[in-house]
Image (cartoon, rainbow, N blue to C red):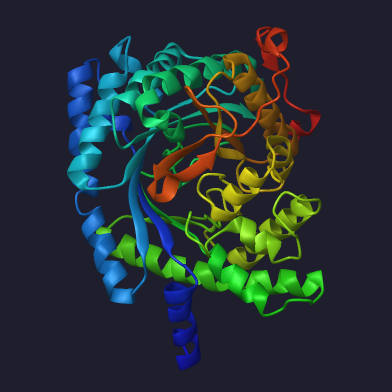
Amino acid sequence: MITDFEILETMKMFNEQHLDIRTITMGISLMDCASSSVDETCKRIYDKICRYAGNLVEVGEKISKKYGVPIIHKRISVTPISIVAASCGATDYTPFAKTLDKAAMACGVNFVGGFSALVQKGYTNSDKVLIESIPEALASTSYVCSSVNLASTRTGINMDAVRDMGRIIKKTAELTKDNDALGCAKLVVFANAPEDNPFMAGAFLGPGEPECVINVGISGPGVVKHALEEVRGRDLGTVAETIKKAAFKITRVGELVAREASERLGVPFGIIDLSLAPTPAVGDSVARLLEEFGLETCGTWGTTAALAMLNDAVKKGGTMASSFVGGLSGAFIPVSEDEGMIAAAASGSLKLEKLEAMTCVCSVGLDMIAVPGDTTAETISGIIADEMALGTFNNKTTAVRLIPVPGKGVGDSVEFGGLLGMAPIMDVNKASCADFINRGGRIPAPIHSMRN
């Protein structure tokens, strides 16, 4: 039985500690939309998305009102467009991006993900077309997000794709330079991308997923920080136990919302992604949460160990609360979207190399990091290659979302607004890795991939 104390405690989480449901994401399979005609395929895509997701926003708002739970975003993820569009024979997939954008606008959602390709072992012809279409697709749409999976523990790293994505990111930045390279904030590259991720920009509906599904992403770094304030000075075992209990409570709220949305929409419930997703708001920062462990500032020695413990405790608490945990599930460390990360990066205590070390134990990787606009495509590819190696050889999901901002350098900053926040331009090692990147080919899978 739920007690009055538990009800008041949950209300306090929402009202004072920034707990929210970050996203209800409806995944929609577009497999049956494929045809030999671009126009016909686009028509089928638009009709199917609107048919399934037409009342997604309305349902989300009703659930939010019923339970008093803030639901920040309603989103759609779809089958990777490189798969859906393969039979069309088109040489430009921008029309598909515009169709997704039009459908997102009609449904009233915040984002649609799935302008994506899975190229961890090599390219299909359709993959090549999609990747070359990314810059124009993101420059000409408002709601579309794009992702490309470049590596996996089972296959190794597609270094041809790593090389190409450095160039694509630079081109996307150039085409959206009037908005401080905003297009790059909607583009992410992955190793070991999960097929049920509800978080943008990496959301897509994998080939092994149902026809339609509801996945929910929760948040709550402010709740965990508040819980840790109650055990200041206690040993780290007590800290871990406290985080587990907070994660349990957060996840139970998320599952309640997910199952309610599933029932109202008549769509199966998929997973809860129990990631701690920060916002630029004060009191909702993963960096400040880490500092509550006893760190003077995020980025100092001990930060990686604290983040590892946080991630593990969140997973342990969440998996006790729900049998259907998936997506990324852990702690995000996006620089521009986290008030504490922004402060640490601006002060110089958090550098790119330290962030890379932290990605070994966090939920994703180098996320929402602004770098000088003159950073070369090969250097961007080198940063991607390092992150793909961390994911592939450690059997975890890693990702890169870099924003090379044309005309800006170290000491400048960019302002995106909303959940995307703002970011100081971070310094990048300028020593060349061009000869390494231009070799191309494939880095083989690590020996521990042979686990059958």
Answer left or right for 418 relative to 62. Answer: right
Query: Vertical placement of 170 versus 283: above or below?
Result: above
Which residue is at the front of the view, 22 or 392?
A: 22
x then y, percent, for residue 411: 58, 34
- Depth check: 183 or 1 in front? 183
Relative height, residue 60 to residue 199 (above, below): below
**Residue 155 as seen in the image, left or right of residue 59:** right
Q: Position of residue 216 (x, y in %)?
A: 43, 56
Q: Quadrant of residue 427?
A: top right
Residue 54 in percent (x, y) is at 19, 49
Residue at the far front: name it: 411
**Looking at the image, which residue is at 31% across and 34% down?**
30
Name the residue: 63% across, 56% down: 287
In the rendered view of the protein, which quadrant contains the C terminus?
A: top right
Q: Is residue 320 in sight in this rendering?
A: no
What residue is at 47 percent from the left and 22 percent from the top? 406
